[in-house]
Image: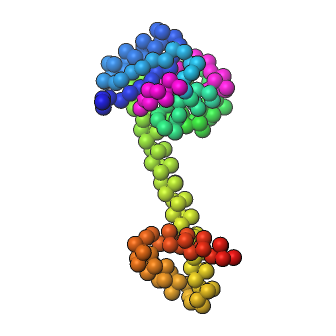
Amino acid sequence: MTDKLSIIVVEPDRDRALLIVDSLREAGEYDIHVISEPTGIARSIQSHNPDMVLIDIADPTRDMLEELTLATGPLDRPVAMFVDQSDDGMTRAAIEAGVSAYVVAGLKAERVKPILDAAVARFNMFQRMRTELAATKKALEERKVIDRAKGLLMKARGIDEDQAYAMLRKAAMDQNRRMADVAQALVTAAGLLG
């Protein structure tokens, strides 16, 4: 098993592919695989499971951009895309699809490595943000369930909120379970009982 960064380069033009590969090899040790035929790109990327994808498209159409973006799994790995021409709509579509670096007229040997580094840094930043957002959403959902469970206990037992919270907490400790799990069980049981 290698610990080199594995990169798939999607480039139909042989000379441009060599430019990218040579630039990367000068910049460091990478496991590089070139795909020259975009047909079946999703399957090829899935089979190689690279750490990063670099795509060079001279003049992409919106459909081509969407297809390539979906095929490369931009939420799974950094994707850097080099294009010769673009407009605001295409740039926005690429960024919204998760492309980490969208570079117009930027395919120059000396720029490949810095753009690769920027794409990886940006991807990692967005991954952290996605993870934090998911944790925040989960915490909010758990808070709602705990509040519903407290409300059920307050109504059923005629107790105040602090007492209901204490009951949930004690039940969680006694059962060695998370308070959110105990609250969810109570809410589910109350729903079944009508």
Residue at the spot 40% in from the left edge and 72% down from the top edge: 176
Q: Toward the viewer: 56 or 167?
A: 167
* Residue 57 drawn in magenta: yes
Q: Pinpoint residue 134: horizontal percent, then vertical percent.
A: 52, 54
Residue drawn 45% across the image and 24% down it: 8
Q: Residue at x 42, y 13 (%)?
A: 19
Residue drawn at (56%, 29%), measured in percent from left and top?
Answer: 71
The percent position of residue 100, horizontal first and vertical second, equals 50, 35
Q: Is residue 165 above or below residue 63?
A: below
On-image quarter of the N terminus: top left
- Is residue 9 in the magenta section? no
Residue 106 in sight in this render: no
Q: Is residue 162 above or below residue 83?
A: below
Which of the 4 image quarters holds residue 95?
top right
Q: Quadrant of residue 42?
A: top right
Taking depth in this image into account, of 14 and 167 the one nearest to the observer is 167
Q: Residue furthest right?
A: 194
How many dots with numbers? 0
Q: Residue furthest bottom?
A: 158
Residue 118 % position (x, y): 43, 34
Query: Where does residue 99 sit, x and y in percent of width and height?
Result: 54, 33
Residue 92 seen in render: yes
Front one among 165 and 25: 165
Q: Which residues are magenta?
A: 43-65
Residue nearer the viewer, 10 or 49: 49
The residue at the far top in this view is 15
Q: Quick one: quadrant of the C terminus?
A: bottom right
Instruction: Tell me which colouring the rendered structure shows.
Output: rainbow
